[in-house]
Amino acid sequence: MGWILLKRVMDLNVINKKSKSATFYKFFFVISISIMIPVIMITTIIGKFSNDHLLKQVNISRESSLNQKRLMVEQKLTEMDALINQFVSNESVWKLVTTNEYPNSYSLFMRDALSLFEKNALSHKLIDSIYLFNDSENIILSDSKYDKSNFEDKAIFDIKFDGVNYVTPSRTVKGENIFSYIKKFYSFNREKNAYIVVNINYDNFWDELIVESTDGLEYFVFDNNHSIIYSDEFYNDEWNDKLLEDISGESENNLELSYLGENLYVWKSISNKYNWTFVVGQKSKDLFQTSNVLTKLNIISCLIILLISLILTYFFSDYLYKPIRNLMKKINKITKIDSIDSKNDYQLIDNVIAYLFTENLKLNNDYQYVFPYFKQHSINDIINNNSFDLDNFKQVLDLLDVEFSFTSHYLMLIELENTNMNNKIKDRLDKYFDKPDIKKIISKINEKRMLIIMNTNKDINQVYALLTEIHEDFNNDNISLTVSLSDDFNNLEDIHEHYEEVQKQLEYKFFVGNNKILSHMVPQQIEKNIFYDKSIEKELLNYLKKQDEEKAFAALRKLTEGLKGSIKNIDYIKYVYFQVCLNIIEQMTNFGFSMKDIGITNREIFAKINEAKTLNEMYELIYSIIRKCIQLFSKLNVMQNDNIINKVKEYIKNNYNKDLSLEMIADYVYLSPGYLSTLFKTENGITVFDYITNLRMEKAKELLLNNKSMKIQDIAIKLGYNSSQSFIRYFKKYYNVTPNQFRKA
């Protein structure tokens, strides 16, 4: 419109030719100063604070991103540790790990271990190879059995470390760039150590976790010995330990350094679990490149605006002043404004523009509010808008001939579960709310959902009772519906907040089931660290292995309640249940059962979990799988009882000189203590404790007769008793004489 006015004025050719007066120069000077001062101040402020603001935001972003990458790396290494523990749970690997020497009879165990290693190395894209060896034997198992002297990766035997596990820096083996996760295991007599080594493909591991940056960001990782675990182009050989010491020595997680003539910004995150320091760096010129460009563009833009403003000020101050006034008078006559104050030219222009603005606004309002809402019969656009406009909403109420005269408001989101929304259902709902003390708007959202905005003096309990009546009535006609009810609110400006509340609350039906009335059940925010407690899953698998049905189901309930109480991400919960099912299936296959025995495939498990509408459906699925597994174990136990008893006796014979307990022996054969005690007595006629005592007494008799110089206290310790008094008491009870009396006799 301004361009049209200017064109019309230029076409009139009514430019005033009079020389400029002093008033013009005053007017021009005042306007020029008024424009210049804000422009200069804005330019100065932006130039001063843009870099600081950018650096502050970048610090937050970089630290968050680096911490996420550190957590991802720790998670991957934890998975490797879990994989090694899974290897050890295999009977063949367990035999090899806990034995110092490998007799010929262990060939079968070695073959099983090699098969297991080869299967995992081929199926896992991060794993390059797997070793198993100990300190005493000259044998190492990898893709085959090798002599240590002929093994290509001899460097692995020279790695020494404290503790149970260790992650090496990157190494080159067979032309492949790898790093190794090593876990140490002690034999029963703790004389020699066994080691399982998982060689991880360096490129695959780090490429998966640290994506190549396109904005100058570079990453590297080093340990407490300043050995480089991972690096890209940012870290090079010229930057020696001095750089790593500077980074390690700073307590802050972000710092500014200067090396080789470059100003660097560095952010770090420390992994206390593996004693690694994760670093991301960026050159200063790259970091502030965008900010500097924006600052220059801002200065140029401000100068252009200032120049144009001054030109326009000069031009309009003199040449267009009177023509615009004449034009406004003509507009005044055309628009038929009756009263206009013409004693001030500027007021005349203001009045004319205000009139045109008002008329234009009225037309826009009529178009924006009458046409769309009558066309769509919906208020969805208003309540979905973050910036709720109360005046606009009241205009909609007027157009719909609805008056909200009561103090309380409620939102109800109704979702049909087994049918679609239609006019019959809408009219039926409308009758329930057609009461003198209720004002309402009913709006269809989609084929399944309907929104009701209620204005009433009823309290929350009365509204809930009304919804219960509606719910029961529809259920009697086999129509299932879930209702999400908001809290009452007095201020209509809060309607958008409560609409989000009922939307989130409706999602909660996943945890409580369909066909319910939901109120005061808005889920909390999703946790940032959404990794579930895998120790509960391990308990479940352990109880399943021990065939303890009651404790296995208790662990399943504990896992379910934990997910329900702390994580509200439905897709993630389905992922957790799928992983638990897969781990159960994998454990069963390790015991020799097939998918056919279990009665379900991985594809069927995935389909059932994906289609589950509630948490209880997934719980019932895993419950049925566990029950089936327990049944399979029960059948297997009948055939394995003799083997178990023999293992127990062998374990007691090899360890009678230790402080044995029923729990320790039960763990060795993966049974519960109660079940082992019952089984042993059924098969042998005596308890486990009596068997241990009989064996010790026989050994005691041999020592007393064959080693007459050996002290009673030494014999007690050699037989596994904590004190000589305990040994004497059991000996006398067994032989009716004391050890000294027996030796003298």
Image (cartoon, grey):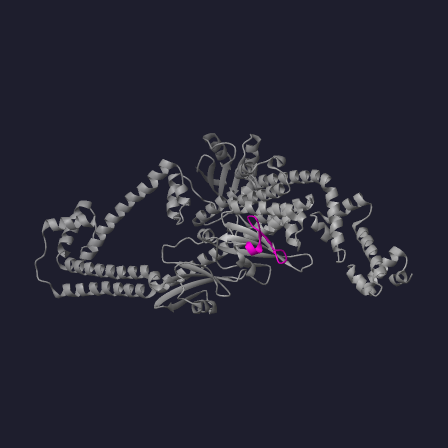
The relative height of residue 511 versus residue 21 in the rendered view (above or below) is above
Q: Tell which residue pokes out farthest to the front in this image.
A: 150
Residue at the (54%, 58%) spot, across then down: 156
Is residue 108 shown above or below 53? above
Q: In this rendering, does residue 714 appear at all?
A: yes
| Residue in front for this viewpoint, 276 or 34 | 276
User: Residue 551, position in %: x, y?
Assistant: 68, 46
Quarter of the image where the C terminus is located: bottom right
Tell which of 137 and 659 is nearer to you. 137
Q: Is residue 306 above or below residue 95?
A: below
User: Would residue 425 appear left or right of 11 to someone viewing this image?
Assistant: right
Residue 252's spot in the image, x, y percent?
A: 46, 67
**Would you say residue 141 sits in the magenta stretch?**
yes
In this picture, residue 535 sits left or right of residue 419: right
Residue 336 at x, y = what percent?
Answer: 19, 46
Point 50% across, 66% down: residue: 225
Q: Position of residue 505 (x, y in %)?
A: 51, 45
Front residue of this view, candidates 55 and 72? 72
Q: Nearer the viewer, residue 301 or 77?
A: 77
Does residue 600 appear left or right of residue 496 in this picture?
right
Which residue sits furthest right? 745
Decide if residue 485 is in sight here: no
Q: Was residue 538 drawn as part of the magenta stretch in this picture?
A: no
Q: Which residues are magenta?
A: 134-150
Q: Count all numbered tags in the image, as a single digit.
A: 0
